[in-house]
Image: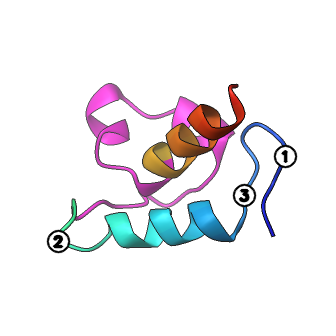
Amino acid sequence: ATTSSCHGQDQGNTNLHEMTHLNQIKGTSDYGGYGYDFIQSLSADQNINHADTYALFANAISLGC
């Protein structure tokens, strides 16, 4: 199922999140937290290496958030 809400989680963005952990893709981290509220607390350097940043960006583009 897909989400219709900005900052929502669904199977597609969960798969993207997990794929960014692969070293062949990006090798991201989670820094001990998940979700929109958590990534807002991270520095720019941490966000560029956080898996949810990519998943939530894709969600925002897809839904026009």
Q: Does the CB distance between marks 3 and 1 fall below 8 Å?
A: no
Q: Secondary structure at mark 2?
A: loop
Question: Camera-side residue: 38 or 16?
Answer: 16
Give the label, 1 or 2, closer to the camera.
1
Whether 20 is drawn above or below 53: the answer is: below
Crowding at mark 1 (Cα within 10 Å: few <14, some 14-19, many 20+): few
**Among numbered discs 3 and 1, the one appearing first in the sequence:** 1
Whether 52 is drawn above or below 1: the answer is: above
Residue 4 lies within the magenta run: no
Crowding at mark 3 (Cα within 10 Å: few <14, some 14-19, many 20+): some
First to last magenta residue range: 27-52
Q: Amino acid at mark 1?
A: Ser
Along the horizontal axis of the image, is 22 left or right of 51? Answer: left
| Colour basis | rainbow
Q: Amino acid at mark 3?
A: Gln
Exactly how many numbered labels are in the figure?
3
Q: Which mark is residue 4?
A: 1
Q: Position of residue 3 (x, y in %)?
A: 81, 54
Residue that badge 2 annotates: 23
Q: Residue at x 55, y 57 (%)?
A: 33
CA gap, disc 1 to disc 2?
Answer: 30 Å
